[in-house]
Amino acid sequence: MRWPGKCLPVVLAVSMTLSAARRPGDPLKPGYNLFSRDDDVQVGKEAAAEIRQRLPAVQNPFLQEYIARVGKRISAQSEAGGYPYTFTLVNEKSINAFALPGGPAFVFTGLLSIVDNEAELAGVLAHETAHVALRHGTHQATNANLIQIPVILASVLAGNSLFGQLAQIGIGVGANSVLLKFSRESEIEADALGTHLMAQAGYNPIEMAHFFEKLEAHGGPQLPQLLSDHPNPGNRVRAVDAEIRTLPRRSYGFVTGDFERAQRELGKTPAAKAAGLREPSGSYRQLKGRKFSFSYPDNWQTVGEPRADSVIIGNPQDGYGIIARYFSPKHGRTDLRAATDDLVSRLRVQPRGSPRRVQADGNPALVTQLFNGELLTVERPEGLFYLMWIGPNSAWDEIVNSIRFGN
Ligand SMILES: [Zn+2]
């Protein structure tokens, strides 16, 4: 009997103790859960079968083996709980990865294309593995459906599909699924256990926190799915650093040595790059701002007034697009490079290397490569004009070449 009649007071007591803040080094245990470990495995298996129908796996044995190898290094650690973990690379451009209860994990090509090193990839996998080990999905499903779940579990004993039954009360794997969208408390725990798993696997755990924070700061006008499912618990780097201090000292230099080859192979995979952007249509229309104009693909939507500031978003769901506007540098009129540096720090974007010099409508301009896009800056009488592009650069040249000032 899974549902003793006098269970509710226990539930309340458990949720009250859970609300106490966790200190670094405190034990990490799964929370209250009406599902069994086997139920987690069963739900995950059934949900994964549905996912595999929807998300095509990348047909590249090297890449699949690589993801599985890094995933296994993390999930083979004893604190991962011994679940039957699997790691599958799926051909989806958005920046995402998720793990279902009981172990099936999926990594999107969009995510693989934006990690800067293997430790960052391992960090995402460690964080996802931690959610599985701490059984956050079914813990949340338990809390959200205290009454229905015992009935469902009873019906599963009679031979019904567990995931099918959960789907009937709205616990699926779609947007905002209780199985995949985590609370801040769960995030704190997953970062802490992820820290342990990474350290045991020989990766520097701080890379996990760095990657999430980097994505937060530079992911674009709208959050990538990875961040909306894993809300920022705040002070990630500090929390992970504090957790590391509770662990035995280790050296963190592990790499498989295959990260660069994986990136090359990924480049050959059709449609693998982080994009999520509806492909530019090939025909353009003109946007007129305050004393500037440029062309943009005509299948994109514009947001904002056609005056001073303009934002163009290609695919609002993924948050990719263009922001064009004027900026007043802190120190007034300085040179283009100083004004650009000021802008870069104010936008909290991370440049990759030094800006390169280009021309925009005959004016000297700089292009700064960003973590996930490009930034064009031009000095104009109205201030520093900038055009920030988040997403793949397939239409970038076309847009830069179409810029005209002083309309
Ligand atoms: Zn998370």
Image: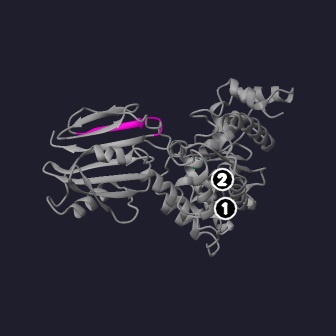
Which labelled disc corresponds to residue 130? 2
Task: Please provide the residue range marked out in magenta.
Answer: 309-318
Residue sitting nearer the eye, 239 or 89: 89
Kind of residue at badge 2: Ala
User: Does residue 369 appear anywhere in the picture?
Assistant: yes
Residue 390 as seen in the image, left or right of residue 71: left
- Residue at image coords 23%, 64%: 338
Q: Say if the magenta span includes residue 320.
A: no
Q: Secondary structure at mark 1?
A: helix
Residue sitting nearer the eye, 374 or 49: 374
Residue 267 as seen in the image, left or right of residue 45: left
Q: Is mark 1 within 8 Å of ligand 1?
A: no
Image location (x, y in percent) of residue 99: 66, 45
The answer to the question of whether label 2 and label 1 lie on touching residues, with beta carbons closer than 8 A, is: yes
Image location (x, y in percent) of residue 130: 66, 53
Disc 1 target residue: 197
Kind of residue at badge 1: Leu
Image location (x, y in percent) of residue 355: 33, 62
Furthest-top residue in this view: 168
Give the image quarter of residue 167. Answer: top right
Q: Say if the magenta span includes residue 314.
A: yes
Image location (x, y in percent) of residue 407: 16, 38
How many neighbours does mark 1 have within 10 angstroms: few (below 14), some (14-19), or many (20 or more)?
many
Q: Is mark 2 within 8 Å of ligand 1?
A: yes
Q: Earlier in the sequence, mark 2 or mark 1?
A: 2
Residue sitting nearer the eye, 243 or 199: 199
Residue 121 as seen in the image, left or right of residue 87: left
* 396 vs 166: above or below: below
Residue 278 as seen in the image, left or right of residue 57: left
